[in-house]
Image (cartoon, rainbow, N blue to C red):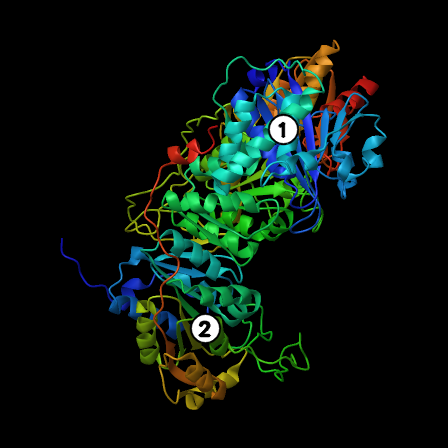
């Protein structure tokens, strides 16, 4: 991340496209993102929808840049209104300033007040009338042409993106779209040359969503069984995984509820197959008892919680980092387990792969806290190569009669047998048990097995991946998970203002690497904990574990609108 | 290497059951070990999955692989294991509270799935482990529990009729007092391809001593096994809950289908390349 974030961003364009159902705002965004990738740019695209199941208004929010991007920028440079029906709903997500440009079709009526009050320049382009000049012409494609010209994207890249994005629509429709795009380019030339500094030669790029990256990380980690119940915003990960698991000889079961899915995963993993489930807040609440079973029976499982606004049903389509408390403390009893959080879209792949391998090796439950802002974001990144992780499930393939499933000899990771292994029979149990797995309520068995389950995790060497540490300044920003992108960018800007800044972006939240964190804090004079929730869950966790000084400050902002780097800079600059 | 055929007692683990003397579950345990011996199933190829309750203690008493999981969740755990390891013989055991109350939803969906599991529900119409409360199969006017001093006032859950309605492809009812008949039914249930539901009347002489009289009250179903759900439904609706035999057996494709690998991870990763 250090090198990625350091790359120059001499081109950095933010574009928003809004439209009502069927207007093609999302398709237009996907085409622009794909074209930007072909030009050698990096990018990030988020989608925003109204509450309707189908046909509601939607918005594509894009940031295209010459350096990797892991968050949205403070303001939008170009807003394209395909139409303005209900577009005011997105006003908070589309911050405009006087320097911004609004492209609007006069036929669509006046620009909504919530956007017009920004004082942004308005350019009237007759998208619809021009689209009608082309057989099967669509106004969103005229808008794509105009927006591409604004961004300085070459028409060849847009044409290639059309071929890919509209492949299922057939040759005729692609030709119509290309004709509309060409008209859009022409219309925008009257706005003058944007003078963008684009990469001189394209490089290999990946176009991947956070949910896909989590799925990929699972597959790389060896997951070949998934059971899950549909829930927003995790369902698209499951839909991505289903055919690919099949392709790799694994399977995905759509369960009747989350109680079933977590228990199915425990069962499959007991059978020796690395397994995971994905869900979001409400489903995650239902899974707590099953997670406890995995911990007590020492069965590896991974649960990916693509967090949304909570509590209860909350805000299903929007992001928040408010499930840290339940991830850390949701299970009854003393139940040591792992909690991890990916730091950006491509890191969803590594963090999930690591979580799978850690759970397998440590025979415990691993919770991965992704969230809507990562899961449903589409990112253009450098190709994300696989890192080899040499952590295997410790199995006993030829047990003797003395075999003890939960043996206390050795290093607390007791070798598992698997069904099918002769003489390896044992009964896994959620009841406290002795070394053989036989239920026991004896104090010594309980104390020893508790200590075994704690020590195997606490004593493990997690290496340096527990966090990404950047800089060595005296002002330290501590963050976790998805908000790390905005925090790292805020740190860059604070350094630009002459402050010496350090960022600790935590990937492993439990077990807390207290010594490593203290080490990373050596020389720090002022601390800010930054997170996207209401109560400051990471802040309170770190306070409770005695790693924060009394004067540490917290910037905790709940969803649904993502934290932007400028807000972080302003909040800190005000107090520093 | 010569293999010596295992006897029923070889499938016992040696762990002493926690059950009360006279409990019907002893006979069910014996019938399971006899059926495993009859079918000559290697111990390590058998997995016995259970939830929580008196009967759910059963896996520890059988020398096979086992998982004593969560209350009501034995069927999903077994479903995950069988879907991931289809070559194993997976049996599920539990009681009426575990299977029909807290686990009721999983029962419906396991019946629908036709996954190749054998589900042995040991029904004594009472929660024994928590000392004698009414279960879903308890009659509405049973007033012996302090928790429901006037009875539950709630109609009884009809396991076999519900299994039929939910699409189970093998439904039978046995009685712990008829161990030979129960063993035969178990053999049929285990060899049935698809989801087999074996409802076992297994008296609790501690909290329901009146169930001793089942001995004289049980009777064979009028006919069966049916392969036609309408006929089976007529029989089970007319039954007094104490009819024994294989009610229903139908052969349908077993779920889930298994696919041979058709691609590599490298191919999956290439999808992301622009």
Residue A560 vs A52, above or below: the answer is above
Horizontal side, residue A564 vs residue B39: left or right: right
Q: Position of residue A431 (x, y in %)?
A: 51, 55
Q: Position of residue A107 (x, y in %)?
A: 76, 38
Residue A138 vs A254, above or below: the answer is above
Chain ID for label 1? Answer: A
* Res B116 seen here: yes
Q: CA distance from mark 1 to mark 2?
A: 74 Å
What is the number of the mark on residue A32?
A: none
Q: Nearer the viewer, residue B108 or A232?
A: A232
Q: Which residue is found at the position 55% from the left and 36% from the top?
A: A176
Q: Give the farthest residue toward the front.
A: A133
Q: Give the farthest residue toward the left.
A: B1
- Neighbor class of circle 1 (other Cα within 10 Å; few <14, some 14-19, many 20+) is many
Q: Secondary structure at mark 2?
A: strand
Q: Nearer the viewer, residue A297 or A289?
A: A289
Given this view, does label 1 or label 2 mark the residue nearer the observer? 1
Q: Position of residue A416 (x, y in %)?
A: 38, 44
Q: Nearer the viewer, residue B130 or A558?
A: A558
Query: What residue would you read off at disc 2?
Result: B122
Q: Secondary structure at mark 1?
A: helix
Query: What residue would you read off at disc 1?
Result: A183
- Neighbor class of circle 2 (other Cα within 10 Å; few <14, some 14-19, many 20+) is many
Please state, as top left, top right, bottom left or bottom right, where the N terminus of chain A lies in the image. Answer: top right
Q: Which residue is found at the position 64% from the left and 36% from the top?
A: A131
* Res A299 seen here: no
The quarter of the picture where residue A209 lies is top right
Horizontal side, residue B215 vs residue A552: left or right: left
Please state, as top left, top right, bottom left or bottom right, where the C terminus of chain A lies in the image. Answer: top right
Q: Position of residue A245 (x, y in %)?
A: 42, 44
């Amino acid at each position: 991340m250090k090198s990625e974030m350091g790359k120059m961003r001499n081109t950095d364009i933010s574009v928003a496209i809004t439209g009502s159902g069927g207007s093609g705002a999302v398709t237009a965004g996907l085409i622009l993102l794909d074209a930007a990738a072909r030009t050698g740019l990096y990018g990030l695209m988020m989608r925003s929808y109204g509450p309707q199941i189908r046909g509601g208004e939607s918005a594509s929010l894009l940031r295209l840049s010459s350096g990797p991007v892991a968050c949205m920028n403070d303001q939008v440079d170009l807003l394209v209104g395909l139409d303005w029906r209900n577009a005011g709903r997105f006003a908070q997500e589309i911050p405009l300033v006087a320097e911004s440009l609004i492209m609007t079709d006069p036929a669509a009526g006046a620009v909504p007040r919530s956007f017009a009050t920004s004082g942004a320049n308005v350019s009237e382009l007759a998208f619809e009338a021009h689209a009608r000049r082309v057989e099967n012409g669509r106004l969103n494609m005229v808008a794509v042409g105009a927006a591409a010209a604004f961004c300085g994207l070459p028409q060849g890249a847009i044409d290639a993106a059309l071929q890919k994005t509209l492949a299922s629509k057939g040759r005729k429709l692609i030709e119509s779209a290309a004709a509309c795009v060409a008209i859009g380019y022409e219309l925008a030339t009257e706005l003058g040359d944007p003078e963008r500094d684009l990469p001189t030669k394209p490089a290999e790029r990946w176009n991947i969503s956070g949910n896909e990256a989590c799925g990929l990380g699972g597959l790389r980690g060896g997951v070949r069984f998934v059971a899950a119940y549909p829930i927003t915003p995790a369902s698209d990960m499951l839909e991505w995984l289903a055919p690919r698991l099949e392709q790799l000889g694994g399977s995905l079961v759509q369960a009747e509820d989350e109680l079933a899915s977590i228990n199915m995963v425990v069962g499959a993993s007991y059978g020796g197959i690395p397994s995971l489930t994905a869900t979001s807040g409400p489903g995650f609440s239902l899974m707590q008892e099953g997670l406890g079973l995995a911990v007590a029976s020492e069965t590896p499982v991974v649960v990916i919680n693509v967090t949304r606004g909570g509590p209860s049903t909350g805000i299903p389509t929007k992001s928040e980092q408010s499930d840290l408390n339940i991830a850390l403390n949701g299970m009854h009893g003393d139940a040591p387990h792992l909690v991890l959080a990916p730091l950006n879209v491509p890191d969803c792949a590594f963090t999930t792969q690591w979580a799978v391998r850690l759970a397998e090796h440590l025979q415990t439950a691993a919770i991965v806290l992704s969230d809507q802002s990562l899961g449903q974001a589409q990112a253009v990144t450098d190709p994300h190569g696989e890192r080899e992780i040499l952590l295997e499930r410790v199995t006993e393939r030829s047990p003797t009669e003395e075999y003890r499933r939960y043996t206390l000899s050795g290093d607390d990771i007791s070798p598992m047998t698997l069904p099918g292994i002769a003489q390896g029979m044992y009964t896994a149990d959620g009841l406290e048990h002795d070394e053989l797995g036989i239920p026991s309520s004896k104090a010594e068995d309980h104390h020893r097995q508790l200590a075994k389950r704690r020590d195997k995790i606490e004593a493990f060497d997690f290496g340096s991946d527990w966090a990404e540490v950047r800089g060595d300044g005296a002002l330290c920003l501590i963050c976790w998970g998805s908000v790390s992108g905005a925090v790292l960018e805020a740190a860059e800007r604070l350094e630009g203002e002459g402050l010496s800044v350090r960022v600790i972006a935590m990937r492993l939240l439990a077990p807390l690497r207290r010594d490593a964190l203290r080490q990373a804090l050596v020389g720090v004079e002022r601390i800010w904990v930054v997170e996207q929730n209401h109560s400051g869950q990471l802040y309170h966790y770190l306070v409770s574990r005695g790693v924060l000084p009394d004067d540490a400050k917290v910037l905790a902002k709940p969803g649904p609108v993502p934290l932007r780097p400028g807000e972080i800079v302003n909040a800190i600059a005000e107090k520093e | 290497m010569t293999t010596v055929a295992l006897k029923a007692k070889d499938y016992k683990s040696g762990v002493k059951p926690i059950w009360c003397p006279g409990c019907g579950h002893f006979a069910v345990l014996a019938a399971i070990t006899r059926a495993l011996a009859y079918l000559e199933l290697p111990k390590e190829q058998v997995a016995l999955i259970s939830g929580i309750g008196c009967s759910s203690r059963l896996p520890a008493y059988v020398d096979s692989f086992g998982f004593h999981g969560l209350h009501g969740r034995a069927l999903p755990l077994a479903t995950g294991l069988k879907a991931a390891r289809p070559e194993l013989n997976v049996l599920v055991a539990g009681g009426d509270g575990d299977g029909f109350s807290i686990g009721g939803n999983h029962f419906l969906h396991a019946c629908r799935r036709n996954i190749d599991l054998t589900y042995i529900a040991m029904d004594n119409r009472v929660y024994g482990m928590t000392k004698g409360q009414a279960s879903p199969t308890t009659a509405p006017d049973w007033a012996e529990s302090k928790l429901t001093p006037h009875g539950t006032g709630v109609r009884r859950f009809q396991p076999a009729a519900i299994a039929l309605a939910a699409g189970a492809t093998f439904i039978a009812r046995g009685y712990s007092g008829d161990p030979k008949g129960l063993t035969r039914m178990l053999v049929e249930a285990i060899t049935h391809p698809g989801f087999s539901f074996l409802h076992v009347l297994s008296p609790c002489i501690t909290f329901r001593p009146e169930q001793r009289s089942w001995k004289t009250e049980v009777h064979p179903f009028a006919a069966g096994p049916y392969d036609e759900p309408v006929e089976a439904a007529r029989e089970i609706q007319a039954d007094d809950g104490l009819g024994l035999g294989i009610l229903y057996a139908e052969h349908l494709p077993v779920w889930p289908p298994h696919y041979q690998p058709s691609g590599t991870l490298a191919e999956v990763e290439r999808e992301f390349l622009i």
